[in-house]
């Protein structure tokens, strides 16, 4: 879809020409890569739209909309609705997918009443439930099935302060998408309360963490790896450690 919106690659952005930095779905310095350099630039205008819990690494914006929601898209839908902006059925469908994905189809404990209200409004704007269903229930590829099987085979169960924590890891010579989806499927299939999954793909290690219990805040762990998220769902991309090193740090 990138060709539809004329996106520019991050490496091609000339930071000298940037006058306004708009952060969406994050406000942590660790998560904005090369754009951290802009924070020290004089007269830089910073706008923030986020739904994550506060952290010590948060950036202060000149304009901020930060609200407790299961999905950032719910906040954006509320703004669009309040301003009376018309959207197409395709746009409503795309935004609905964001809400369904971020809330686990309204099953994650971080889901709020406002997420339901936003989804209902998007449905009124013509969002297609058939398209949403097709996208959410898509079949796994052969590579994803292989990755999921290896992930499950590698899993170890650890009792930490009376809480069972599952740690799993997998390697792949090439990048395989939707690793978070595979971790979620694993969690549901085995009815796990807490899981930390590591995947080394190409030259990076990806961490996906999920928790169903208040005793384990996975966002705090992901933060130590340069990532973040919610107490129930978090992730990180590690570029300076091997899979073994990341696993050792996790333990």
Image (tube, rainbow, N blue to C red):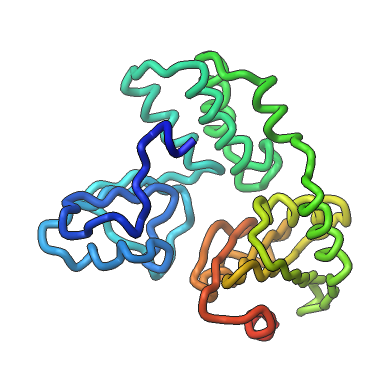
As rendered, which of 56 and 42 lies closer to the eye? 42
Q: Work out whether 82 lies above or below 99.
A: above
Instruction: Give percent across and percent down for residue 7.
Output: 37, 42
Query: Is 67 left, or right, of 89 in this rendering?
Result: left
As rendered, which of 165 and 1 lies closer to the eye? 1
Residue positioned 55% across, 67% down in the render: 237
Residue positioned 25% across, 67% down in the render: 37
As rendered, which of 212 and 179 lies closer to the eye? 179
Instruction: Give percent across and percent down for residue 50.
Output: 41, 48
Q: Quadrant of residue 44?
A: bottom left
As rendered, which of 77 and 238 lies closer to the eye? 238
Residue positioned 66% across, 78% down in the render: 243
Query: Is 46 left, or right, of 156 in this rendering?
Result: left
Query: Is 211 left, or right, of 60 in this rendering?
Result: right
Query: Is 200 left, or right, of 228 in this rendering?
Result: right
Task: Count every numbered label the image shows and give the total.
Answer: 0
Q: Work out whether 94 lies above or below 208.
A: above
Instruction: Give percent across and percent down for residue 36.
Output: 30, 66
Residue positioned 79% across, 39% down in the render: 139
Q: Quadrant of residue 190?
A: bottom right
Instruction: Give percent across and percent down for residue 172.
Output: 71, 67
* The residue positioned farthest toward the left in the image shown: 43
Q: Quadrant of residue 38?
A: bottom left
Q: Quadrant of the C terminus?
A: bottom right
């Amino acid at each position: 879809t990138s060709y539809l919106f004329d996106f520019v690659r991050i490496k091609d952005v000339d930071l000298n020409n940037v006058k306004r930095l708009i952060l969406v779905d994050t406000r942590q310095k660790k998560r904005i890569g090369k754009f951290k350099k802009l924070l020290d630039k004089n007269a830089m205008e910073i706008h923030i739209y986020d739904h994550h819990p506060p952290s010590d690494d948060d950036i202060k914006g000149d304009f901020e909309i930060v609200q407790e929601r299961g999905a950032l898209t719910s906040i954006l839908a509320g703004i669009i609705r309040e301003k009376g902006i018309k959207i197409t059925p395709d746009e409503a469908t795309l935004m609905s997918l964001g809400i369904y994905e971020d809330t686990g189809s309204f099953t994650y404990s971080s889901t709020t009443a406002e997420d339901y209200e936003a989804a209902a409004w998007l449905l009124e704007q013509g969002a297609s439930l058939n398209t949403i269903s097709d996208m959410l229930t898509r079949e796994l590829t052969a590579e994803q099935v292989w990755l999921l099987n290896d992930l499950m085979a590698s899993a170890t169960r650890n009792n930490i302060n009376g809480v069972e924590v599952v740690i799993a890891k997998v390697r792949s010579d090439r990048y395989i998408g939707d690793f978070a989806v595979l971790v979620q499927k694993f969690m549901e299939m085995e009815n796990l309360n807490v899981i930390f999954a590591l995947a080394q793909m190409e030259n990076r290690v990806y961490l996906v963490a999920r928790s169903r219990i208040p005793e384990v805040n996975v966002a705090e762990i992901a933060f130590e790896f340069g990532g973040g998220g919610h107490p129930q769902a978090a992730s990180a991309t590690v570029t300076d450690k091997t899979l073994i090193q990341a696993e050792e740090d996790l333990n």
